[in-house]
Structures are given as C-alpha cells and as structure tokens.
Amino acid sequence: MPQQSTQATEVIRIGVADKSPLIQAALKQILSEDKRFKLLHVSRDCEEFLENLGRQSIDVAIIGWVFGNSDGRVILDRVNAQDNPPRIVVYTGLASDTLPAQVMAHGGAAFVSKSEQPAVLLDTIADVAQGRMVFPFIDVRTLYENPLVSLTRRELEVLASLATGRTNKQIARDMDVSLNTVKFHVRNLFQKLGVNSRAQAIAMYLSS
C-alpha cells in the first residue's frame, strides 16, 4: 500500500514502550522507513515511558502488554488520566479473545497483533492519529461488565499505581497531591469495587 503524502499533514510523533529489545529495534526500523512518522522516544517499562512522556509529548504511543509485574492496563490508565494524553495502540503477540476488549475498556485506541504484517501496524497508527479507533470485532456488551467502569480517571490512575506495588506516599508524589487525597481515592475505589484490601482491588484490576 503506498504511503500517504506528508505534504498536507504534519509528521506523527511516536513513542514506544516494550520490554523486548528486539521489538524496540524492529519498531525503530519500520518507523524510520515511513515518512509519516517521527519516533521521539523508546521505553522499557511504564515508569520510563511516563518519564519520557513528561519530557516530550507525542501523538501516538505504541505499547506492548506485558511489563514485568504489570501490564498495558497500567500505562493506559495512568496516561489517560493525564490532560491531553496521546492515543495508544497496543501491539502484542499475546493470543486472547478478551484482550482487545480490555484494551478498549481501558481507553486504548487500537489493538494490533504482532502476527500482522508491519504495514497493518503503520496504517493503524496513521488512522489512530486521525482520530479513528481500530479493533477486531468486539462484543461491546462485555465492556459494561467490567467492574472498573464505575471508577473515575483519578481512581483508575491510583489503582493502576497500586498494581505496580507503589505506596500511598509514592503515588502522592507521582500525582503531586497530598497523602490524604490518595487515601481518599483509595477508600472510594475500594467502596465502588466492593473490596476491603489492596490485594483484592489489584486482583480485580488484573482480571478485568
């Protein structure tokens, strides 16, 4: 498929987050060969990605799904809690019928399997940059079964941080809010999810 002209549109700024050096190298290569895109930063995990994003804003992020003791939900929820977040494409080799629905439920803009040809990923990035969502077939009724839909963006951000093992003090520092504010969000999300402990909340989060 021929590349789109870059004369009438601005170059799309890209950030990548994937734990695999091989995938990082492959994405650097294919993105460098397409004049529609400019790769600004590459990250190995969620924290590094958020640090890079704070230094350089991007239009579209390409992220994997598995990051050590966390997964793409953490990036999706923490990024989407920010003002003017980039659109996020999840690019993974995991085979799961429910994963695309999880990506959509957590605010992702697209899902692409690593089994697809590189051109599919590149065209998906371009579509997402123009405001489109790109997913395989999803029964949208399953999205309303997600127990997290009742949480606010801030509560999701706190829960995503809890899932990475961060303490209330660390979360307060990350979010630049008081410790009492974090405790308030934790109490609220516990109540909404019907749980009594961090372990229960995290287990529900990681299964949703």
Image: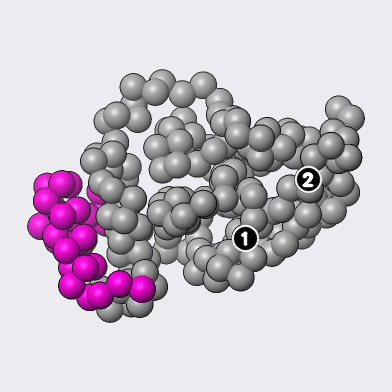
| Visible residue check, residue 166 | no
Residue 5 image point, x, y percent: 88, 35
Q: Is residue 152 visible?
A: yes
- Residue 193 magenta-highlighted: yes
Determine crowd level at label 2: few under 14, some 14-19, many 20+ residues with C-alpha closer than 10 A.
few
Q: Quadrant of residue 55?
A: bottom right
Q: How many marks?
A: 2
Residue 194 forms part of the magenta stretch: yes
Would you call the spot at circle 1 few (<14 residues within 10 Å), some (14-19), or many (20 or more)? some
Element at badge 2? loop
Q: Is residue 116 left or right of residue 140?
A: right
- Magenta portion: prevailing SS class: helix
Indicate the position of residue 23 as horizontal and vertical percent values: 70, 55
Tell me which segment is drawn in magenta: 176-204
Which numbered tag is attached to residue 57? 1
Indicate which disc residue 10 carries: 2
**Residue at 57% across, 45% down:** 87
Camera-side residue of 162 and 51: 51
Of marks 1 and 2, which one's residue comes earlier in the chain? 2
Mark-to-mark CA distance, 1 and 2:
15 Å
In percent of width and height, residue 107 lies at 45, 42
Three-letter code, disc 1: Ser
Q: Residue at x 45, y 57 (%)?
A: 82
Disc number for residue 78: none
Depth check, front residue: 141 or 52: 52
